[in-house]
């Protein structure tokens, strides 16, 4: 099946540092989404991207939909302890479909106060 | 918060026993999904449903079956549980009217097969 290569697998940073993570694919996606999972909970959507080249911000988070439609990145600025969790990218092949998101394997973020 | 509840939240069972996980939604959404989450694999789709009695397989459907007799309930059944099915299972729903690709997840069901 389709695969998303998400990197890095894990990050250990100091509070206040910026964070960057990305996803790449050999296939084109029409929608890219970034989710965060807090410990013991289900993933929650952070940012959704619908157009190639789109750059979207949500507070300290910024995400971009790659121009080739095969990649996306997520940046977190000035990290804080509550940013700890697993971050997942997800791609959707067709903008008209409501199923079959393909998820990356996740980036585990640890923030040292 | 999206109205999704999963039950049970935790279960320990033995190899060879049947197990059913339940997902209940109060949002009246058409699409429902079952994912499993395992270290090193992220979230993988098991089965999904696009309406009552309408279901289809995901990428890791072997050993699992599903049923959807009502809009609000989506059941995942392991007919004969194996140790490889030890995992955290997440139900998700999506709103077909918004058509954004956004999934709303439940809190997960942790299954241990001994």
Image (cartoon, rainbow, N blue to C red):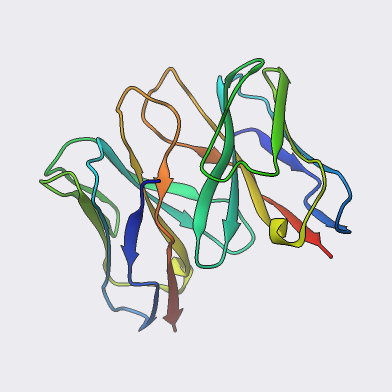
- Seen at 45% across and 74% down, the residue is A81
Which quadrant would residue B38 be assigned to in this image? bottom right
Residue A24 as seen in the image, left or right of residue B100: left
Place of residue B34 in the rendered image (x, y in percent of width and height, measured from the top left): 61, 39
Place of residue A47 in the rendered image (x, y in percent of width and height, measured from the top left): 33, 46
Query: Is residue A107 placed above or below A59 in the rendered structure?
Result: below
| Count of numbered circles in the view | 0
Which quadrant would residue B49 be assigned to in this image? top right
- Seen at 33% across and 62% down, the residue is A6
- Seen at 67% across and 18% down, the residue is B71
Residue A58 as seen in the image, left or right of residue A82: left
Query: Is residue A109 placed above or below A75 in the rendered structure?
Result: below
Query: Is residue B52 placed above or below A68 in the rendered structure?
Result: above
- Report the front residue among A86 and B81: B81
Place of residue B73 in the rendered image (x, y in percent of width and height, measured from the top left): 72, 26
- Report the front residue among A39 and A7: A7
């Amino acid at each position: 099946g389709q695969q998303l290569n998400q990197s890095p697998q894990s990050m250990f940073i100091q509070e206040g540092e910026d964070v960057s993570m990305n996803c790449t694919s050999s296939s084109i996606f029409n929608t890219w989404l970034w989710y965060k999972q807090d410990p013991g909970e289900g993933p929650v959507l952070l940012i959704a991207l619908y157009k190639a080249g789109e750059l979207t911000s949500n507070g300290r988070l910024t995400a971009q939909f790659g121009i080739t439609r095969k990649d996306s990145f997520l940046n977190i600025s000035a990290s804080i302890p509550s940013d700890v969790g697993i971050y997942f990218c997800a791609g959707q092949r067709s903008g008209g479909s409501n199923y079959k998101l393909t998820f990356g394997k996740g980036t585990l973020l640890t923030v040292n106060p | 918060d999206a109205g999704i509840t999963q039950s049970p939240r935790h279960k320990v069972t033995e190899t060879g026993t049947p197990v059913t996980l339940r997902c209940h939604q109060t949002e009246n959404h058409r699409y429902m999904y079952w994912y499993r989450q395992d270290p090193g694999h992220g979230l993988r789709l098991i089965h999904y449903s696009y309406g009552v009695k309408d279901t289809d397989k995901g990428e890791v459907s072997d050993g699992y079956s599903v049923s959807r007799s009502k809009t609000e309930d989506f059941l995942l059944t392991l007919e004969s549980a194996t140790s490889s099915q030890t995992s955290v299972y997440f139900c998700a729903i999506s709103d077909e009217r918004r058509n954004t690709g956004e999934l709303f997840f439940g809190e997960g069901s942790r299954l241990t097969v001994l």
